[in-house]
Image (spheres, rainbow, N blue to C red):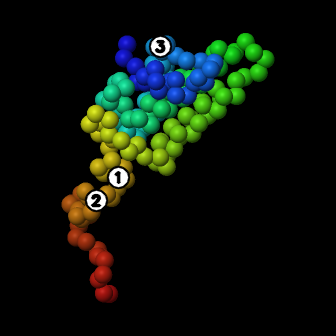
């Protein structure tokens, strides 16, 4: 099974004294990657993000944060209280995902030629449609009723 993050990316969020991953649990990593990619797919085409070589770096960091956060929660689940560091990572990752979905955070890298969909805005009208007239879109509208800069 291909992974979206590397061991080094997971270890970046782990406590170097208490936890150092030698390998990743593919099921836990796949669960986190699936959740992140399904949510981000609302605004980006994620179909080509299949492994660590073609997934944008911020998405990999989010997956790694969730992976380590949930791993910590599992390891310390027998303790009387929840692990605050694990929750901190999970909450920060969720904040980043929400920021991506809302448009407050933009994915800026293009991993291995990944199309991040940044060429056109997701709203209409956009740069590609600025030269269009309403009659070009729907001929039933008839001639233009007014235009910019016209003196009445």
- Left or right relative to 37: residue 92: right
Quadrant of the rendered image containing residue 41: top left
Relative to 23, say whether 148 is above or below.
Answer: below
Q: Which mark is residue 121?
A: 1
Label 2, label 3: how far apart the Cα atoms are? 46 Å
Residue at (63% x, 18% y) in the render: 18
Relative to 25, say whether 50 is above or below.
Answer: below
Earlier-in-chain disc, 2 versus 3: 3
Q: Is residue 44 visible?
A: yes
Q: Quadrant of the C terminus?
A: bottom left
Whether the residues at callouts 2 and 1 have beta carbons within 8 Å, the answer is yes
Residue at (70% x, 24% y) in the render: 83
SS type, badge 1: loop
Nearer to me, 103 or 145? 103
- Where residue 50 sits in the image (x, y, percent)? 34, 24
Residue, disc 3: 23
SS type, badge 3: loop
Q: Quadrant of the N terminus?
A: top left
Q: Is residue 47 visible?
A: no
- Where residue 134 sits in the image (x, y, percent)? 26, 63
């Amino acid at each position: 099974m291909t992974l979206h993050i590397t061991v080094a990316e997971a270890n970046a969020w782990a406590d170097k004294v208490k936890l150092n991953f030698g390998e990743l649990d593919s099921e836990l990593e796949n669960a986190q990657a699936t959740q992140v990619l399904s949510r981000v797919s609302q605004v980006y085409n994620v179909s080509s993000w299949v492994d660590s070589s073609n997934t944008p770096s911020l998405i990999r960091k989010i997956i790694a944060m969730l992976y380590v956060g949930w791993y910590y929660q599992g390891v310390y689940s027998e303790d009387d209280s929840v692990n605050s560091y694990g929750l901190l990572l999970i909450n920060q990752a969720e904040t980043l995902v929400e920021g991506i979905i809302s448009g407050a955070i933009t994915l800026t890298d293009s991993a291995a030629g990944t199309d991040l969909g940044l060429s056109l805005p997701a709203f209409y009208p956009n740069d590609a449609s600025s030269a269009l007239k309403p009659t070009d879109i729907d001929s039933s509208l008839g001639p233009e009723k007014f235009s910019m800069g016209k003196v009445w």
